[in-house]
Image (tube, grey):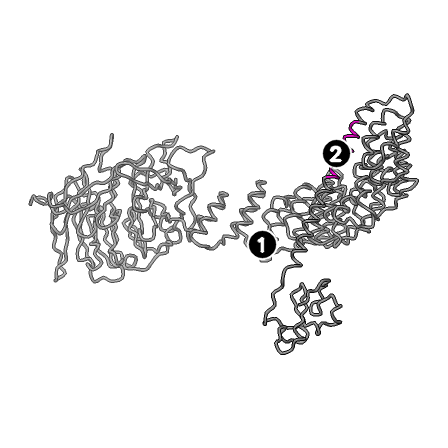
Amino acid sequence: MAEKLPVNSDSGTESTEEDEEVEPKFKYQRIANDLKNILNADVVTCTAVHSKFLIFGTFRGRVYLLDHQGNSVDSHLSNSEQHTHKVAVNQVDVDPKGEYVATCSDDGKVNITGLFSCENNQNLSFGKSIKVVALDPDPKSRVRRFIVGEDKLTLYERNILKKLKPTELCAVEGSVLSICWQGNFVAWASHLGVRVYDLSERCSLGLMKWEVPQQARLENFRCHLRWSNEHTLLIGWVDTIRICVIRKRNGIEAASSNLPGYVVDPVSTFQTTFYICGLAPLASSQLVVLGYRKERSANYKALRPVLCVIEYKMNSSEEICTDSLTLRGFEEYTVNDYSLGCIIEENRYFIVAPKDIVVASLIETDDRVEWLIKHSKFEEAIDLISAHGAGSLPVLSVARLYINHLLTLKQYEDAAKLCLRMLGNNKALWEEEVFKFVKCQQLRAVSAYLPTSEDCKLDPHVYEMVLYEFLKFDVKGFLNLIKEWPPQLYDGLAVINAIHDNFRKQNANELLESLALLYSYQGDYESALRMYLKLQNKDVFELIRRYELYSVISKLIIPLIHLDRERAFKILLDKQKIKPEVVVQQLEQNHEYLYWFLDDLQKIDSSNVFQRKLVELYAKYDRSKLLPFLRRSKEYVIQDALAICKREGFYPEMVYLLGCMGGVEAVEALNIIIHSMSDIEMAIEFCKEHNDNDLWNVLIDESTKQPEIVTKVLDGIVDYVNPEIVVSKIKLGQTIPNLRESVVKMLWHYNTQQEVLCTAHEIQLDDYFDSHSEVVAMRRRAQHVSDEHHCPQCHRQVLMKSTANRNCLVAFKCGHIYHELCIPGGTASVQCGECDTGNSDPSEE
């Protein structure tokens, strides 16, 4: 069985404890099963990876075939001793179909072995050490060709007679260290560098010399070659990586006939911080590189190998991630003890050490999600699942873990927002998650995000718990929820009882407003009104208007006026909403409010039945309106009004009322004007208004007692009283101020009046005679009679030649003409019988 391999990940730079851990790109599994038993007795020297199996050669010269889980697979490799080398196996290669394996060893042998058939097996002995061998990568070849590298590069081809024909391709500087074959191109390394050979043109495309490392020989490092595609070659040697592209020469380059048709272009060259043990492609510009650290441990042992993802550019690179691998016996290994195999199509990489083989696979969505959750990167985990679809772990499960994590960190608001974003309309999940907030006493944090629509309405108990927590810790928030939440979410009566049980004076305003709203939701509008009135909240008027609560407010009239008189009277003065009798009855205990109401009522209904009350209210609160009201209205008891005015000492009002009563009371009124008010002009006007001789006599008598007012009386009595009466009562020798001017003015007035009367009489006479002349002239004027006129009585023509008696006619001013004999009532009648128009003077012809 396979076991997971612990690794350390870093970003390629020196890390500290405070650095954030980087998400790994790979998951690692150590191959076990039969492999473990084999490596207990032997060590791996070389491997070849196929999509179906794994082949490796050992130090003892054995070659094993295993599946990817490390189980041995029966084949000709394991069934026969003749295919086993005598010493360590240097190279293993497998054809694309996985049917044949080529191996070579220091025993000088090259073996081509069919795994399941012996038909094309080959056994070659060279008598010297053979380091590399490569099979034709063409799936159709059926091992018809292979290449062996020694001190020269040799191509072996099998002819029709199944005989091998060797062809020397190229001489070698030293010996061939590595071969990699793709299509018609064979890349190989020697002691000087790397060449690419074109099998179609049978020529080398040139030598790429490699820099010799300091204090070491180039051949002491294994050269790692890998074709990432048909024309891209990856080279890793010592600590340098070069990416080369095999391209066809352009027209200018191909002009010289001595040059091959293809050229090798290095597109990127860069160094690594470690020695290279293998490389393979990952993405378009990324490589997976197995490295051997240059540094040593404190006891001069080898450090753990690294698997690094490198992103390359023109001549630079960047380490994306680096994993340190704990392989068995890594402290004793050298750089050439490691190798890297890969299955490019599956992004699987086999890290091979002498005593261990580990498979690195790109982590899948589930693995990434698991790692992100483990490292509390829940947001990234949710995004990953959303982008790639749910695997074994649904997104809701991750979200709930995230909510738990946020609650643990006391990030309650973020946890609530996450509930809103992830739980949707799942009622059951909402209720489960809300109870987590209950345990933390943080229902307030989630309240703003709870679903309240009909699509997802939670149990009423949930909303009530939220309200109770707000009531306990945040009364203002409690009020806001009562305003915002639909009342059908919770049991309103239960919440009302909770408010009464937890009522606090310091929060009275908020609690009273909450009660008002809750009572309104329950339809108990009278209680709601009382709460608003306690609050002095003017929303009470909107509540009355919206729900037409006019029958409820009869006992709340005074508080309503106290809250807002204008808005209250707008309701109270509307007889269709509430009767004035009800209002007046309630306002009897507050005369000022009663005065305001009746005063406004008088403006819109001057015939109301409460005007008797207004006399006393005007006398008490606004005397300026009393006299105009007394003059305007007749709906009060004059004696009661007079008593009130006498009590208050309102002389102008008393004068008016006494004047209305007439007789002795009028004299009393005049005495008030003269003695109490000392207003002689008003006294004169009062006498003129009543034009009573007794009043004038009283006034004249009083004037004789007060010489300073005699002239005013003389000026005022003109046209009303004979001035001689006043003058005659003046005592001889009495000094009257301005008497002369007053007498002259009076005489001038009488002369002017006489002239006006004479002129008016003359004008009247002239007008009379002119009108009389017009009447006489009109009477004398003839009236036209023709044959067209008919008698309204007999309906015949008024002019009749046959009967003389009929020609006596009577014409009226209305235009009707009768025969004299046809007039109803005879000629004595003075009215036209047709139109009953009075004609006192009918004309006869």
Which residue occupies 62% across, 55% down?
Answer: 458
Q: Can you see residue 378?
A: yes
Is 701 drawn above or below residue 480 in the view shown? above
Q: Quadrant of residue 798?
A: bottom right
| Position of residue 16 measured from the top left corner of the image (x, y, whole percent) | 44, 32
Report the magenta residues as a range: 744-758
Which residue type does callout 1 highlight? Leu
Give the mark, 2 or 1, whose residue is nearer the N terminus. 1
Q: Is residue 1 magenta?
A: no
Between disc 2 and disc 1, the foreground one is 2
Front position in the image: 383 or 39: 383
The picture places residue 715, in percent across and down from the top left corner, at: 81, 30
Give the residue at x 75% y 40%: 504
Determine which quarter of the picture holds residue 599.
Answer: top right
Q: Which residue corresponds to mark 1?
A: 429
Would residue 779 be found to the left or right of residue 732 on screen?
left
**Circle 1 sits in a helix, a strand or a loop, which is it?**
helix
Q: Residue furthest left?
A: 257
* Screen quadrant of the C terminus: bottom right
The picture places residue 395, in percent across and down from the top left corner, at 50, 52
Amino acid type of disc 2?
Answer: Thr
> In the shown orientation, is residue 194 left or right of residue 684?
left
* Residue 500 visible in the picture: no
User: Is 401 located above or below residue 673 in the figure?
Assistant: below
How crowded is the residue under tag 1: few (<14 C-alpha within 10 Å), some, or many (20+)? some
Name the side, left or right, on which 698 lies relative to 70: right
* Residue linked to disc 2: 752
